[in-house]
Image (tube, helix red, strand yellow):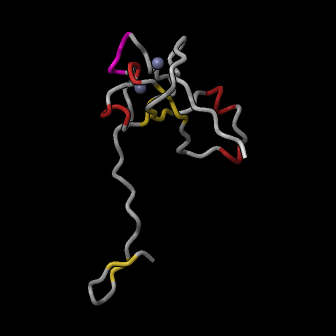
Amino acid sequence: MTTPATPSCDRTGCTAGAVVHWSRRPTAEELAATPAEQQTSDMRRLVHACGPHAIGLDLAAHVHSSTCAGPNAGTLPQCGCTPEPLTPTQLPTLATLTTGWQITP
Ligand SMILES: [Zn+2]
Ligand SMILES: [Zn+2]
């Protein structure tokens, strides 16, 4: 068993340990490097940041564009891109019984 390496901040030149992360769309190069059978319409890449380079919590809830420059010290706590709008949280499908109980099928 191996211990996974602690991700470090993705800010260029920063070697601090990451404390937060958010996701962005893969770039064309990353997409090209991904086997076709692993490509989906909802592919995301994790972006890591240390505390001082973290974007705002509200922004981190969004999926960012493939060209997102964050963490970008010049734009913090913004990231410089226009993130995708939030989609409603996916709730598990509930089945309603005739008695009114809702169960997860
Ligand atoms: Zn950093
Ligand atoms: Zn962004």
Q: Main secondary structure of the magenta part?
A: loop
In this view, the residue in front, 15 or 79, is 15
Name above or below for residue 35 compared with residue 13: below
- Quadrant hosting residue 5: top right
Name above or below for residue 105 compared with residue 38: below
Q: How many marks?
A: 0
Residue 94 located left or right of residue 67: left
Percent position of residue 19, x then y: 45, 31
Residue 105 located left or right of residue 6: left
Percent position of residue 2, x then y: 71, 42
User: Where does the C terminus fall, quadrant-wise?
Assistant: bottom left
Residue 32 located left or right of residue 22: right
Q: Is residue 31 within the magenta segment?
A: no
Residue name at image x 36 percent, y 53 percent: 89
Name above or below for residue 72 compared with residue 83: above
Percent position of residue 25, x then y: 52, 33
Q: Is residue 77 within the magenta segment?
A: yes
Q: Quick one: which residue is furthest to the bottom in this view?
A: 99
Percent position of residue 35, x then y: 73, 41
In this view, the residue in front, 17 or 55, is 17
Residue name at image x 52 percent, y 44 percent: 42
The magenta stretch is 74-78
- Quadrant hosting residue 79: top left
Residue name at image x 37 percent, y 61 percent: 91
Residue name at image x 30 percent, y 89 percent: 98
